[in-house]
Image (tube, coloured by chain):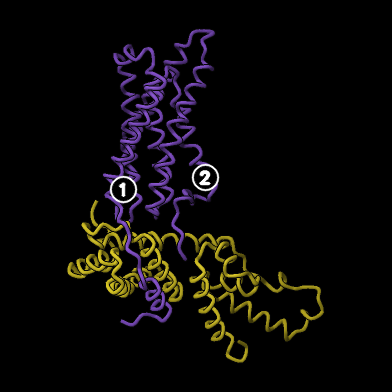
Chain colours: A yellow, B purple
């Protein structure tokens, strides 16, 4: 039963761990400045752990934010008498594993849409130009990371409210807003500015 | 290093006006507190219902001791394990802690079941006894399960399925301890069914994402 951050994770200097431990202890007492310093300090380390799982850069950033929110929610579970490193790595690994499992589940249920799946009887849908635009948009949406794609589908295509989408996905409204914002930015790039 | 804008703003919003929090007590201390509650519940039930009539005879039977100690030790080990495993910095290997005691317990009740079936005289009031048994099991299970659930919810376990299983095992161990002290009817399997089956159903129905009530809710 050793420190769980000794395997796989980038090694942390003992002084850094001690500093983080002190900052976290102060954060638990409501010291805003120490807590902000801690979150800024750990974010790159969490990001480096997330990158090792093979997540795309966008997914990686979502994962970092998820870990930061988790740390915030369960900060009362950290015992300042114990090293901070294993606690941080434990939270990060568990949240990353949840994310990878969720992604694998979504992928296993998805089937790629072809034109045959999408053809509708309405005349306007048979317009070649519109069909081509729709195809490009679908392709661009399909290229989005799973979290962003889900957010776009629920909020933009199904026109759900933030509250409804949060209930469906289990994500916070803030996380959904961030995901849609990134998705729209990415779609602009994929489709070119004139189409966005 | 500069953070991406959205992560930067998230950090700012999390840190802004961060509220002081009451730290969790060490898991061993929380485990001891819950075990003390279990002892009180068993003592209250024993003073209300009285110990089983043949307790003196049973005390001389090694098989009874195997079963009683097995149940109590399973409850104790599962309690310490569940409070440890629900914290992110504790190794998951803690889930194995109750395994030897649970094996001991299972051996005891397998032997007890066999002995009981052979020993039941024709026409004995088994159903009536079983009803009293079930009441004891439920009366032990409800307060213990409820308090444990509340304690674990505060932990926001990142391993909710492990916590759910171990919690159910802890409650089952103590419920069976109460039952073995109070009743003559062999009902260890019933105790396990009452405590562990609902958890199994929830875990399986939740697509192995069990312990949903203990699951952390964030934006992830």
Within the image, what quadrant is residue B13 found in? bottom left
The residue located at (36%, 80%) in the rendering is B3
- Disc 2 is attached to a residue of which chain? B
Foreground pick, A73 / B166:
A73
Within the image, what quadrant is residue A26 found in? bottom left
Left or right of B124? Residue A29 is left
Foreground pick, A174 / A110:
A174
Q: List the residue tagged with mark 2.
A: B202
Nearer the N terminus, badge 1 or badge 2? 1
Left or right of B212? Residue A35 is left
Mark 2 Cα-neighbour bin, 10 Å: few <14, some 14–19, many ≥20: some
Residue A183 pos. (x, y %) = 54, 78
The secondary structure type at the circle numbered 1 is helix
Q: List the residue tagged with mark 1.
A: B84
- Disc 1 is attached to a residue of which chain? B
* Residue reaching furthest to the bottom: A194
Residue B194 pos. (x, y %) = 49, 33
Q: Is residue A7 visible?
A: yes
Question: Is residue A175 shown above or below B83?
Answer: below
């Amino acid at each position: 039963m050793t420190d769980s951050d000794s395997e796989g994770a980038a090694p942390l200097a003992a002084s850094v761990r001690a500093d983080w431990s002190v900052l976290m202890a102060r954060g638990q007492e409501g010291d805003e400045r120490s807590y902000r310093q801690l979150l800024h300090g750990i974010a790159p380390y969490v990001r480096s752990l997330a990158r090792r799982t093979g997540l795309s850069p966008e997914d990686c950033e979502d994962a970092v934010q998820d870990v930061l929110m988790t740390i915030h929610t369960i900060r009362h579970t950290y015992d300042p008498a114990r090293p901070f490193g294993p606690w941080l790595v434990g939270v990060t690994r568990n949240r990353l594993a949840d994310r990878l499992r969720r992604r694998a589940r979504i992928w296993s249920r998805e089937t790629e849409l072809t034109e045959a799946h999408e053809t509708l009887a309405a005349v306007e849908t048979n317009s070649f130009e519109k069909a081509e635009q729709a195809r490009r948009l679908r392709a661009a949406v399909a290229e989005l990371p799973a979290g962003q794609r889900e957010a776009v589908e629920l909020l933009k295509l199904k026109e759900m409210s933030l509250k409804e989408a949060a209930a469906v996905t289990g994500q916070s409204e803030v996380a959904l807003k961030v995901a849609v914002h990134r998705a729209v930015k990415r779609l602009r790039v994929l489709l070119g500015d004139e189409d966005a | 290093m500069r953070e991406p804008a959205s992560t930067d703003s998230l950090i700012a919003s999390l840190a802004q006006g961060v509220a002081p929090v009451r730290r969790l007590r060490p898991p061993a201390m929380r485990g001891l507190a819950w075990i003390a509650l279990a002892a009180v519940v068993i003592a209250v039930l024993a003073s209300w219902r009285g110990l089983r009539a043949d307790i003196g005879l049973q005390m001389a039977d090694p098989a009874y001791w195997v079963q009683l100690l097995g149940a109590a030790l399973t409850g104790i080990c599962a309690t310490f394990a569940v409070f440890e495993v629900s914290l992110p910095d504790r190794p998951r290997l803690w889930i194995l802690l109750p395994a030897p005691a649970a094996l001991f317990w299972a051996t005891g009740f397998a032997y007890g079941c066999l002995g009981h079936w052979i020993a039941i005289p024709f026409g004995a009031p088994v159903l009536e006894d079983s009803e009293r048994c079930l009441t004891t099991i439920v009366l032990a299970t409800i307060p213990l399960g409820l308090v444990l659930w509340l304690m674990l919810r505060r932990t926001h376990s990142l391993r909710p399925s492990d916590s759910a299983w171990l919690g159910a095992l802890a409650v089952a161990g103590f419920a069976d301890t109460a039952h073995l002290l109070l009743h003559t009817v062999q009902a260890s399997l019933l105790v396990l069914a009452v405590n562990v089956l609902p958890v199994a159903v929830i875990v399986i129905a939740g697509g192995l994402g069990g312990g949903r009530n203990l699951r952390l809710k964030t934006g992830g």
